Image (cartoon, rainbow, N blue to C red):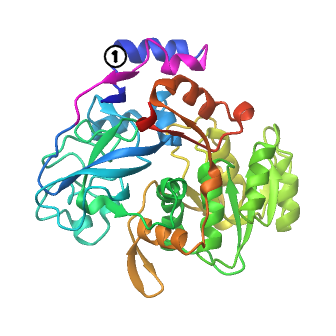
């Protein structure tokens, strides 16, 4: 089957890192770790797994970090190479293991990609998985699978940037007819934004700043509305088309990101904060928003998140920051900020019951409470991956939110 395989050998890593500093196309060029290959389908690891033919495979910001070689090297300890990229997915079951009773061939599904103890066949599970916190699994390198945090970063499972992949039955959600492929694909990134909001709900009447107008930022705005949070939502976005989408997701105020710190004036005015000029650098905000959800992962966005949050406030890092440079950490101790991070989801408390985050998001989509389908803006066959990645990384020109592969049309 055709698949986009990532294999960062030392020579390819070094060559791509050097060339990528000159032109971004080098990150998916001839010498890069990424290549389109004809590979064998991965076997079902055990009888309680299924095989899924991919209908849509999304390009996530984490995939772009991987391809651009700016993810933390620490993650390589939890990864097995080579692997097929892609964890955002919608597909159709084409093979069912003999031990699977609740799924059948032909079902349209989306798959929750993490590979904790249950998927790895580990009994008893680790303490975190046993407590229901499988997003904090302690054994991502153990069991009958090679190391890997999730499908799309494990050599044994394949990924959604291929024609098919395999999944443990516990990861699979059958899709209601009312949930489109486009919405189902966005269930996973939306779950990433719902999870931290349900773990630490914003207090009623608080002001929440969402930094970033990409797909995750738009999902964060939608999540604040879907969870019924009685908050004022401010969106800080880079491009006008992102501002339009933020209004569509019902942000209360949309602020354009400036090249300097001019956007500080708008946020100060909206929060009755004061600004003071230091000897060097950006202005210092006295006051600010109650909660900042950082959805970019750049050094600048993290620095702004810390500066724009009020004393005693909370900063949630969703942008998968790796090794930021030039971030002034002073606000953390000066303002006693609560800085938390999140990258996946788990089991939540919602209206008196326990429910998996992905399941909750799919319920909202089925009920028409959430519609993110307009975020799917560009589609490509696998063989056009260079054009797809150019589109995903060139938002100023492409106006892209979610770029997807359609492997079955390759």
The quadrant of the picture occupied by the C terminus is: top left
Q: What element carries label 1?
A: helix
The quadrant of the picture occupied by the N terminus is: top left
Which sits in the foreground, 314 or 328?
314
* Bounds of the magenta segment: 22-41
Left or right relative to 332: residue 206: right
Residue 9 spot, x, y in % from top left = 32, 18
Report the residue marked by disc 1.
10
Left or right relative to 352: residue 233: right
Which sits in the foreground, 315 or 60?
60
Q: Which residue is drawn at 42% across and 62% down?
A: 345
Residue 184 spot, x, y in % from top left = 48, 58
Q: Residue at x 53, y 12 (%)?
A: 19
Q: In which quarter of the image is residue 23?
A: top right
Magenta stretch encompasses residue 341: no
Question: Measured along the vertical axis of the image, is residue 222 above or below residue 157?
Answer: below
Question: Measured along the vertical axis of the image, is residue 221 above or below residue 13?
Answer: below
- Residue 351 in sight from this viewpoint: yes
């Amino acid at each position: 089957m055709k698949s986009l395989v990532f294999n960062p050998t030392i020579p390819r890593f070094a060559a791509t890192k050097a060339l990528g500093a000159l032109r971004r196309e080098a990150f998916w060029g001839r010498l890069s770790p990424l290549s389109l290959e004809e590979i064998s389908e991965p076997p079902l690891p055990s009888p309680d797994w299924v095989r899924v033919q991919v209908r849509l495979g999304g390009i996530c910001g984490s995939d772009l970090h991987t391809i651009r070689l700016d993810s933390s090297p620490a993650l390589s300890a939890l990864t097995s190479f080579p692997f097929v990229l892609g964890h955002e997915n919608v597909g159709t079951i084409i093979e069912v293991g003999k031990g699977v009773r609740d799924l059948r061939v032909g079902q349209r599904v989306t798959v929750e990609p993490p590979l904790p103890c249950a998927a790895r066949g580990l009994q008893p599970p680790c303490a975190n998985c046993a407590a229901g916190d499988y997003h904090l699994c302690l054994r991502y390198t153990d069991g009958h699978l090679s190391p890997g945090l999730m499908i799309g970063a494990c050599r044994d499972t394949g990924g959604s940037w291929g024609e098919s992949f395999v999944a443990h039955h516990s990861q699979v959600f059958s899709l209601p007819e009312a949930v489109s492929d486009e919405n189902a694909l966005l269930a996973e990134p939306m779950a990433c934004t719902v999870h931290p909001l349900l773990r630490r709900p914003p207090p009623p009447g608080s002001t929440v700043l969402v930094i970033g107008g990409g797909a995750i930022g738009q999902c964060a705005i939608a999540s604040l509305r879907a969870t019924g949070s009685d908050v004022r939502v401010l969106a800080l976005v880079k491009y006008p088309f992102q501002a339009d989408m933020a209004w569509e997701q019902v942000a209360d105020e949309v602020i354009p990101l400036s090249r300097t710190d001019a956007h500080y004036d708008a946020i100060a005015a909206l929060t009755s904060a004061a600004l003071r000029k230091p000897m060097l650098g950006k202005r210092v905000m006295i006051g600010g928003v109650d909660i900042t959800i950082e959805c970019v992962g750049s050094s600048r966005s993290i620095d702004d998140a810390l500066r724009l949050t009020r004393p005693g406030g909370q900063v949630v890092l969703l942008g998968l920051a790796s090794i930021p440079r030039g971030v002034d950490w002073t606000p953390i101790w000066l303002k006693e900020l609560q800085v938390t991070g999140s990258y996946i989801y788990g089991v939540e408390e919602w209206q008196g019951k326990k429910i998996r985050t992905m399941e909750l998001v799919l319920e909202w989509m089925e009920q028409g409470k959430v519609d993110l389908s307009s975020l799917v803006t560009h589609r490509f066959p696998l063989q056009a991956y260079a054009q797809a990645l150019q589109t995903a990384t060139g938002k100023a020109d492409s106006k892209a939110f979610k770029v997807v592969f359609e492997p079955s049309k390759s």
